[in-house]
Amino acid sequence: MSSKQIIVKYTQDKEIFEIVVDSEMAYEYLSGKRTDPMSILESDEIWRDAKKGIAQSQDKIRKAFGTIEIAVVADRILKKGDVPLTTEHRNRMLEEKRRQIIEEIARNAMDPRTNAPMPKMRIENAFNEAKINVDPFKSVNEQVEQIIERLKPIIPIKIAVLRIQVLIPAEYANQSFGILKQFQMKSEEWMSNGQLKAIVEIPAGMQSRFYDKINSVSHGSAQTEIMK
């Protein structure tokens, strides 16, 4: 094997399943930059012992994974197995996953005292103060809830979805409708005077973006109200 090739090992019921992959591409796959597991494989083979060139039997692959489709099996091995990434790759994955989690929290969180969005810098500072470690191999959604609980003693924070009622003057209604459709529009009412009344649901952290967009297209004439 070349220096760029690594063996990813997965064990189930004492049976060993290995794949040979490109180390840089494996990092990209696990960090979400690649989505096709076939693109990182050095060979389309599931091995029992890759170094010795001993292939795993089809029956044992099917028993362990419920399929012999290479892409499905390789994905499981990559996500559940032992991936010998370099320290550099692991550090890059940690930083990338940390950034993704902070962005996800900022997109969905608010200060419950003011209903204002929570700035990313404030979340990041609280991360540092709480000494939070992220898991590079777990998804963002698997980690966010637990991390928010650890942030609460440091900053007032709440994950929330806001329902906002919007009233658009007739002259800007058509243009504004396109903006509203970019969000989750729960209702729309075209009034007899041409005005558009709508209710949208948005993650709390997207308030500023929503207001900026709707005010830009309506030249600041839109009326908005957060519904209780």
Image (tube, rainbow, N blue to C red):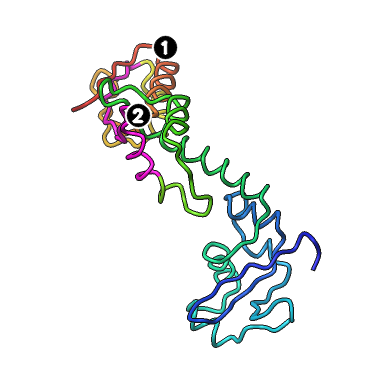
Residue 212: quarter of image: top left
In the displayed structure, does residue 93 sit left or right of residue 169?
Answer: right
Q: Residue at x 38, y 28 (%)?
A: 177
Residue indicated by mark 1: 219
Q: Is residue 178 left or right of residue 3?
A: left
Which residue is drawn at the image coordinates 67% and 79% (left, top)?
Answer: 49
Q: Residues within 10 Å of mark 1 (few under 14, many from 20)?
A: few
Q: Nearer the viewer, residue 164 or 206?
A: 206
Give me the disc on residue 154. Answer: 2
Name the amino acid, label 1. Answer: His
Instruction: Using the image, determine if residue 50 lies above or below residue 166.
Output: below
- Picture layout, residue 138 above or below residue 121: below
Q: Position of residue 194 (x, y in %)?
A: 29, 20
Q: Where does residue 119 sit, x and y in percent of width and height?
A: 43, 24
Q: Which residues are magenta?
A: 144-170
Q: Earlier in the sequence, mark 2 or mark 1?
A: 2
